[in-house]
Amino acid sequence: MSDYDFTYYPGCSQSGSAEEYGDSTEAVCKALGIELTELPDWSCCGASSAHMTNDLLSVALPGRDLAEAKKLGRDVLVVCAACYSRMKIAQKRVLEDEELARRVEESVGEDPRFAGQVRHLLDVLVNDYGLARIKERVLLPLEGLKAVPYYGCLLVRPPEVCFCDSVENPTDLDRFLEALGVEVRPWSFKTDCCGGSLSLSRTDVTERLVNKLFTRAEEAGANCIVAACPMCVANLEMRQQPGKFSFKIPHHLPVLYFTELLGLAMTLPGTDRWLKSHIIDPMPLMAETKLMIPS
Amino acid sequence: MIHTVNRRLEAKLEERTGQKVRHCYQCKKCSAGCPVAFAMDPLPHEVMKLVQYGAEERLLKCSTIWLCASCETCSTRCPNDIDIAGVMDGLRRMSLESGLASEREIALFHKAFLNGIKLAGKTNESVLIGQYKALSGRLFDDLGLGAVMFLKGKVKMLPRVAKDRGAVRRIFKETEKGS
Ligand code: SF4
Ligand code: SF4
């Protein structure tokens, strides 16, 4: 048995638009001895759309997954910041509000009062596994990468359910990246919203938010943005497409997952496949920094 | 023009969301830090004022409650501990129930998203985009982007489904009136 033994809630994106996030998560966990057992027959957490339109539904959808997790007993590991937020909020509410818990139990048909912990992988790596031990596993220090860490909304807000060390200026991802040898560039937009929930419906609003993030990242001297949420990455990549799709000024900064960089630093097989599946191709940056030889 | 002040709306919102909008003293910190403020009318602090006035119809029709991205920046900064994002959620749900909702596209997106979950138990990019395009009639937006996503394997043709879709459908049925 491993010291780190979790029920894994993969979340929808990790086998779809963010497959590279799911695959890199599984690969780094395996390499570090973090054991993941997938939650059997999990369903979608409802994301923003449920909580924006129906309060009870927004607790009942993750409630079904919490009920499944309760049967297994282990702590739950999540990598999507939106799933993390929805599960943590639903869990807090069913544990604190018995009347609500009863209504959720009625609609789910099972007991949603899961009392174990729901953790984000970044939290486990930084705060349990420890950066000193991660450093020991780095075979290829990521010199040449200059990253701005992008937390977005749901890793830090609301602070009552989130793990980060500060709501206005979190440093968990900063410290993680430094442990991999990445140069972390200071910027003031770590926790600014990317407008993901409006990406398809009010593209005009989202584009302005995304454009601002890229412009500020470039001004900060970064050559990549690193995130821990598939919604943020998809939205940044989709809405940053060169002129022909949206912006007048094209940006080319790759947007990467923290798990992919850990895989790269540990020289895990599969890293090139993950990186190549991004909409904004990071391979030119990999070649320029000599972190990966183009094949 | 606001001619009357009544506390009905404030009381209704408190019942739904637990938030006490009367505590707002118009410091405007919420609007100052709101990333979407440039597109909003009224601004978040003005929404609070209008709630205090009881300007229900104006609020349920406004686009602000739909443009709010639920980023919670305002809620973490309000000196009076008002969860402004929670108030926006409450108003949005009331606006759906009353049939006064503006910003049809945003409401349709949420509907498409939830329909997808009801169908498969999980969210699939192909189903979501298809549902949204069918509901909104915006068939030709983002075609170039769609092609890139398809080539990069971002849109899977085979949908992911939960085995017990009945259980998920039942949740939708049981929570229908649950907003
Ligand atoms: S931050 Fe709070 S007190 Fe200040 S205007 Fe906004 S809601 Fe009112
Ligand atoms: S939660 Fe809504 S109102 Fe508050 S800062 Fe974010 S977008 Fe603005």
Image: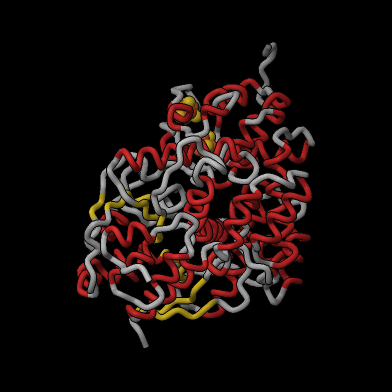
Q: What colouring does the structure picture have?
A: secondary structure
Q: Is residue B85 visible?
A: no
Q: Position of residue B143 (x, y in %)?
A: 66, 50
Outermost residue to the bottom: A1
Q: Residue at x 26, y 47 (%)?
A: A185
Q: Residue at x 73, y 44 (%)?
A: B138
Along the line of sight, which residue is nearer the eye, B92 or B5? Answer: B92
Outermost residue to the front: A295
In the image: residue A178, left or right of residue A218: left
Q: Residue at x 52, y 40 (%)?
A: A243
Q: Is residue A101 visible?
A: yes
Along the line of sight, which residue is nearer the eye, A127 or A142? Answer: A142
Q: Which quarter shows the N terminus of chain A? A: bottom left
Task: Determine whether B80 is above or below A254 in the image.
Answer: above
In the image: residue A256, left or right of residue B164: left
Q: Position of residue B35 (x, y in %)?
A: 48, 34
Number of callouts in the render? 0
Task: Determine whether B60 is above or below A160 in the image.
Answer: above
Q: Position of residue A249 (x, y in %)?
A: 45, 37
Q: Which quarter shows the C terminus of chain A? A: bottom left
Q: Residue at x 71, y 40 (%)?
A: B105
Tell me which corner region of the image, top left, top right, bottom left or bottom right, holds residue A143.
Answer: bottom left
Task: Determine whether B142 is above or below B157 in the image.
Answer: above
Along the line of sight, which residue is nearer the eye, B57 or A49? Answer: A49
In the image: residue A239, left or right of residue B179: left
Q: Position of residue A199 (x, y in %)?
A: 58, 45
